[in-house]
Amino acid sequence: MSFHVPPLPFDEPDAPPLDLPRLLQHLGMDLDTVLLHADVVFPALAERGRFEALRLLLDAGANDVWLPWTALMTAVAVGSVDDVRRALDAGGRLEDTDWRERTAWLLAAHAGDVAKAALLRERGADVHARGWGGAPAIFHAIEAGRVDMLRWLIAEGQPLADTDDDGCGPLAFASGRGGAGVAAELLARGVDADEGDGHLNALWLAASAPVVRLLLDAGASPGELSAEGRRALVRLPADPDESALDAVPHDAVRRTGLQRRFGDANPTPMDNPYLLAMVRAGVSAYRAGRHFRVMGDAQAPIWSAQRFGQSVTLLPDGRIVQIGGEHEDSYDPDFCIYNDVFVHHPDGRIEVFGYPEDVFPPTDSHSATRVGEAIWVIGGLGYGAARRIAETPVHRLDLATWRFDRVATSGPAPGWLHDHRTRLADDGRTLVVQGGQALVAVGEARDTWADLTVTHRLDTVTGRWSRDA
């Protein structure tokens, strides 16, 4: 019998305590089945560090013979402090490891039991031990969502700058496991919200809405948000779900088609059932074409809501706005840069708005910042033919009407830029633009870009750019 341990709630503020009925529901089996297959279930739970679940099953009559640990390790994981002391007095070896290379000290960190960890340290445990993948004690506390243990380890001098063998830092490690409590603690301790590069970036790894919001509120670069994190943030399942397309009548597809169309008004409500289903599905154009037995081409790519370089802006009333973005690379027949807007409402309703290309051009890797009752969209990569070295495109999206207007600006603009960051200054009117890449030369085969090293500011009242000295 193979056994998969499904995710169990551990550190979300509103998660109720784990009890036996909820555990059995999560495991998908009754108690008799669990006890019958304890030789498989127990090692699986032990590997995942679900020590509370093991303790519940032991209290319900399971035999601890199936626990894959020494007596000392078993006492640390599911016993009392007195059990640990007796195991130590009986000669329990501190540095024995299990198949995940966890010592008793690391198991104590995972269990979140400060008293046990303190006892092991006093008896000489190696507090610098590392488990599977080079994970130090802090990572084990993070994996189990043990905020109190994390605080104690930090107070004991465990370094917050530590990484595992892959170079993953503690905040990124917490983000990838949905641990909002431990992530908040790390941010409060001064860990950079932008910790890590590429696929080891904290926001890139975040796949739960609470963690994504925490990181964005702490100043993480929105451009690092993954497709899974973006879907979780807008209250959709993190993984794409092609079954959402089953709700689209095939006659509606034949009538409206699957291809991208620009709006003919500013804005144009796009209530096409295919578009709305694609936002919920989050699948690629290729999968949509396969689903409806239609193929895209370079002249008419299939419309997809699966994007990168799409901005996300959170509104105070709970709505979330996504703008533009790119689907696939330029060599793909379904490559497309979009100029549409998705509005996700707190009740789950979704609106899509389209625009004429000359009102709001296709854009990706731009910034989108709320200023009062509008979102200001600055820069973007866009199609090569539209780029102008000395120009910085600025558009204003009215949140009452969803109308886009091009903003006329003056002064020393940063130029055509992308992957930059924009924030609203404390005065409530000045947008501060930093980082990213600015266009310095247009070539026949490839454009040339350079890092934007000077901070630029845009006054949203006067439309004037300025540069910091």
Image (cartoon, helix red, strand yellow):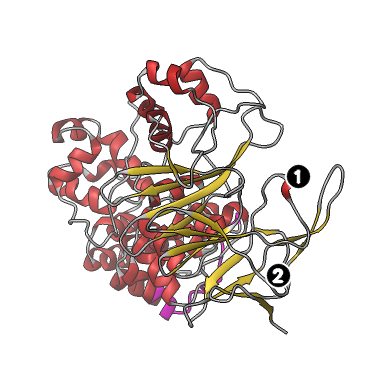
Q: Give the range drawn in magenta.
A: 152-166
Q: Is residue 427 magenta?
A: no
Q: Which residue is the extreme one toward the front? A: 265
Q: Give the residue type at disc 1.
A: Ala
- The image position of residue 143, as x and y in percent, is 40, 57
Graded by Cα atoms within 10 Å as few (under 14), some (14 to 19) or many (20 or more), the crowding at tag 2 reads some
- The image position of residue 162, as x and y in percent, is 55, 68
The mark that comes first in sequence, 1 or 2, is 1
| Nearer the observer, 438 or 123 | 438
The residue at the point 39 percent across, 71 percent down is 185
The residue at the point 64 percent across, 75 percent down is 464
Q: Is residue 157 magenta?
A: yes
Contact (Cβ within 8 Å) of mark 1 with mark 2: no
Does residue 458 appear in the picture of this structure? yes
Graded by Cα atoms within 10 Å as few (under 14), some (14 to 19) or many (20 or more), the crowding at tag 1 reads few
The number of numbered badges drawn on the structure is 2
Q: What element carries label 2?
A: loop
Q: Give the residue type at disc 2.
A: Ala
Q: What secondary structure characterizes most of the magenta part?
A: loop
Q: In 3D space, how far apart are the residues under numbered discs 1 and 2 (Cα atoms)?
A: 20 Å
The quarter of the picture where the N terminus appears is top left
Which numbered marker is on residue 413?
A: 2
Does residue 93 appear in the picture of this structure? no
Q: Is residue 249 left or right of residue 426?
A: left
| Nearer the observer, 237 or 152 | 237
According to the image, label 1 marks what residue? 385
- The image position of residue 86, as x and y in percent, is 26, 65
The residue at the point 23 percent across, 59 percent down is 79
Q: What element carries label 1?
A: helix
